[in-house]
Image (cartoon, helix red, strand yellow):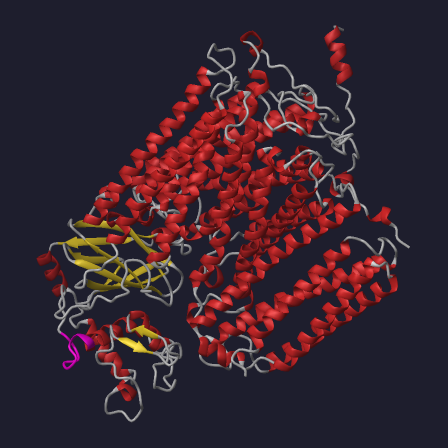
Amino acid sequence: MSDAATALREPWPDLDRQRDGVSVGIWLFIASEVLFFGALFLGYAVYRALYPEAFRIAGAETEVFYGSVNLLLLLTSSVTMTIAVDASRHGMRRTVIACLALTILLGAAFLMFKGLEYSADIAKGLLPGAHFPLQPPQTQLFWGLYWVMTGVHAIHLAIGIAIVGVFALILWRRLLPIESPAMLGVATYWHFVDTVWIILFPLLYLVDRS
Amino acid sequence: MTIDSFMTAASDYANEVDGTFWVLVVISSLITLLVAALIAGFSLRYRRGSTAPRGPLSERFGRDVEIGWTVATLFLFLFIFWWAASNQLSALNVPGHAMEIHVVAKQWMWRVQQPGGAREINEIHVPENVPIRLVMTSEDVIHDLFLPTMRLKQDVLPGRYTYLWFTATKTGVFHLTCAEYCGTDHSVMAGRLVVMTAPDYARWTNAQPEADDLAHQGEAVFHSLGCSGCHAPTSSIHAPDLHGLYGRAVPLADGRVVTADEAYLRDSILLPAKDIVAGYAPIMPSFRSAVTEDDLVKLIAYLKSLSSSPDAGVSPASGKERAGGTPALPGDRRMGAPQ
Amino acid sequence: MTDAAIADAAVDTQPASYLTAGHTLLSWLTTTDHKRIAILYAVSITLFFFIGGIAIGLVRLELMTPQGLFLTSEAYNRLFSLHGIIMVWFFLVPSIPATMGNFLLPLMIGAHDVAFPRLNLFSWYLYVFGAAFTVYALISGGVDTGWTFYTPLSTSYATGYVVAAATGVFVVGFSSIATGVNFIATAHMLRAPGMTWFRLPLFVWAMYTVSMVMVLATPVLAMSLLLVIAERAFGLPIFDAARGGDPVLFQHLFWFYSHPAVYIMVLPAMGVVSEVIPCFARRTIFGYAFMVYALIAIAVVGFMVWGHHMFVAGQSPLANLVFSFLSFIVAVPSAIKVFNWTATLHRGEITFEAPMLYALGFVGLFTIGGLTGLFLASVPIDIHATDTYFVIAHFHFVMVGGTVSAYMAGLHFWWPKVTGRMYSEAWARFAAITTFLGFNATFLPQFVMGWNGMPRRYHYYPDVFQAWHVMSSVGALILAVAYVLPLIYFGWSLIYGRRAGANPWNATGLEWQTSSPPPKENFHRIPRVDVEPYAYDAFVHLPMADNRTPPSLPSPASGGG
């Protein structure tokens, strides 16, 4: 059962144009996010080029296990999200909502493991400051960037979970049809958050780790 | 303080900058007058109700004019760029025998160390007609040393050395000021640049209380901090020999080759793990907590002296040109650390 | 009662429009109508304009004597910092795009609204949220880092409310990004049938290019401020030299945004001027295509010149050379625009209503501002002039003499469309001329002071500069009066102003083909476009006698209003 009429919003003349509009809008937003994270990656690149040895020493302390588990979780969540998008195109209501729910669960699991990882990091004293356990001092640069990069990513993920959650609720309550153009926007954002982790993972967890 | 103490051109370079400035003023004024005259003229001639001829211009005329003034503007701007750039480039080469004065900026004062050992606060005494190279660093935030009569300024950064060089051609007392907002008393972080004739400068230097020169003081710091424990040739620890180090190319463990300039020496003392020399283990501890900025200035002066007279260890320094001189480093530039 | 009075009385009943569609405060605060959102923005930025203006008024008063009058250095430093932060992010950046862009973009392209109306409202709430942080910082005592937040002063040494102020700017940046996303999608997807790219008014092109810059540059500012907050609030070292960090890295990140930001402030102004001058010269814009390419060139090359703010920061001479070169290049398209506006006057039929006075003022003042930019693009000149009043004068010429003049031009030009009322032309002209004179009196002395060595951000200064400072402060007083006047006569016009027709200026452009004020849905029927923009030349072919009274534009084949 499709309900095209309720999906069309002002000021769009037709649903196809609206769908394209959502696409344009979300990709522009992704572009801005690329520059947002890009500035961070630039800082990382500059300091890693300046202090390769310190970054090697500092990078050896990251929790590869948690990082890898999280990578798998997010990659899987992108699969479930993709299935949801495809199902929405075919009007498969139950599949869509189930996949969105799975995506949320996987994202929440990521955050849980992240919390465990942060506890482990803190237990090792890896908070930059007077009692930082590693030498030389530039290892604190790596760890400062670590906390900012993973923190900002986690916030993006949390926002993503909230958005997917609200969207799933809206679909479940039939406030929007399953084929809603908003699906693509939500999915694109989710894939972007996943992509950021795919880039972060080697930068933080695979520094000279063979 | 008179406008002279700000605006007098006290070096040849300052005169060149002024020349460029006035050329730009003339060009800009002409363009501004042209635009203003056209706007005023058209406004008058083509105001509603006037009898001037109207009607469209031919499209080709419009396009030709458009291309014409685009190209003309581009050429004019490129010309100005070239003129200014040639000013900039010719000022980049520091004379090899420049006299080095160390400046440490902190909120909200300037501490100056003359090569002869004299210390000054908020004042820099220099002899005229001698190239002066200021080696500057900050203890806290970013400051900027501004010498208006030299038409020069340079940001002074924490954790790094930056440089300014000039040759004063006029004696007098000139303004020196901070030109990078640095907190509450930024506007009173000012001082004087005192340019004297060479004999006056020599007299002034000799009258200063600190008799010992920087390099000697540096040697004392070198021993008191225990550096010779590892770096002396007789030490059992495998540490790089520091004789002749300054100015030399140093191969590093990661394959790069760097020049041992002031920044390298400073980093080696404060952040020894940053650039490990090839063939050596990274065992040197950091002296960050043990050494002050003033100590660093002295240590670096001492290490430099190890290069100018490899066997003597310390060269006799005077207020002006040092025997043997300061080697002009390949990367030495007016602005910023060597590349 | 005379016939005229009866007619006036009949006309004076409020016609149905977007203004009458809902009278409650809630209807305004939950609106998704781009026109109402534009007004929400206009009220907000006007408030902040005057807050920022009062701050600098106090500063200019303090600068009347070299040793200060009534402020401590702490207070002085916080006032000029506040002035910069408020004026840049809470006035200039949103000014023309969020008010006129929001109101006019859908009208000019023949759409019912922007692409994402709810995102539009959200962007205003982001502005308000960001403003709240800044007001909190202000009330708590202010921030003292300058609007540039340089490290390590901002991260480790400043005593003011850096985190609050930086958070405020961080949040309001996302308002910018949201607006930019909206405008680009709108321009791409919602143009009326027949409205091809090269039939768009230059104002739309300006909104489009400025939106690209907002979307791509603002995130870098957001990250640079986030890193400052991370270091200051959480002790995470990013720029700390003692641990190997580089304070100059902050400057690169900051200026990578803040240079394009000045084009964010200037491109919309150029768009406004390109609408006003053809209308009051009754001629099509000279060189439409080149004007479009110039907008695009400024937006693109504007991303490549940020290092010219850092010639003395410790960059290599090679970097200085490259940035200097590119800075000269970016000046060329701006110069072309100045020539084209001037050429548009040629063979026109010129009248001098307030919008035109402001627009012509823009051209002159922007020319001076831009030429002094060439001074600063020359490295040896900049080494002397940077961080002095020369730079302050330069950027005020382009941002105030430029952008604010254009903002005023646009405000007057579209006031009848937005409110349905005419303002008092006599008072408006008086204000325009007073603005021009007051502005020059304020900022021309600053060029002289700056070249003579007067540094910027100075509370106390050497006696020699007092005469210039006094001149500048007196000019600022005149300017202040000129800025308060519009509040009065615009306010008056809302109640007593003559009701405006659909097209009081006989201008081209789709926004004039609908009523003043427009109906909520903009057009009763989406128009179809088949004419080139700025078709004013149609008039000029008429014989001389008829040129005295410009006839109204023939109505298009289909149309609304």
**Residue C55 or C73: which is nearer the viewer?**
C55
Residue drawn 79% across the image and 43% down it: A14
What residue lies at 36% left-to-right and 66% top-to-bottom?
Answer: B139
Residue C95 percent location from the top left of the image: 58, 39
Residue B168 is situated, as x and y percent measured from the top left of the image, at: 18, 52
- The residue positioned farthest toward the bottom in the image shown: B236
Which residue lies most toward the left here?
Answer: B199
Residue B2 visible from this viewpoint: no
Q: Is residue C318 left or right of residue C364?
A: left
Quadrant housing residue C552: top right
Instruction: Please provide percent x and percent y for residue C265.
Output: 53, 42
Residue B308 within the magenta-colored segment of the rendering: yes
Task: Specify the quadrant that holds the C terminus of chain A.
Answer: bottom right
The verdict on residue C369 being magenta is no
Q: Quadrant of residue C423?
A: top right
Left or right of A105 on screen, residue C500:
left
Q: Quadrant of the N terminus of chain A?
A: bottom right
Q: Is residue C386 visible?
A: yes
Q: Which residues are magenta?
A: B307-315
* Rendered residue at 32%/40% (across/down): C465
Secondary structure predominantly adopted by residues drawn in magenta: loop
Determine whether C278 is above or below A14 in the image: above
Q: Seen in the image, is C87 located left or right of residue C322?
A: right
Q: Is residue C139 above or below residue B266?
A: above
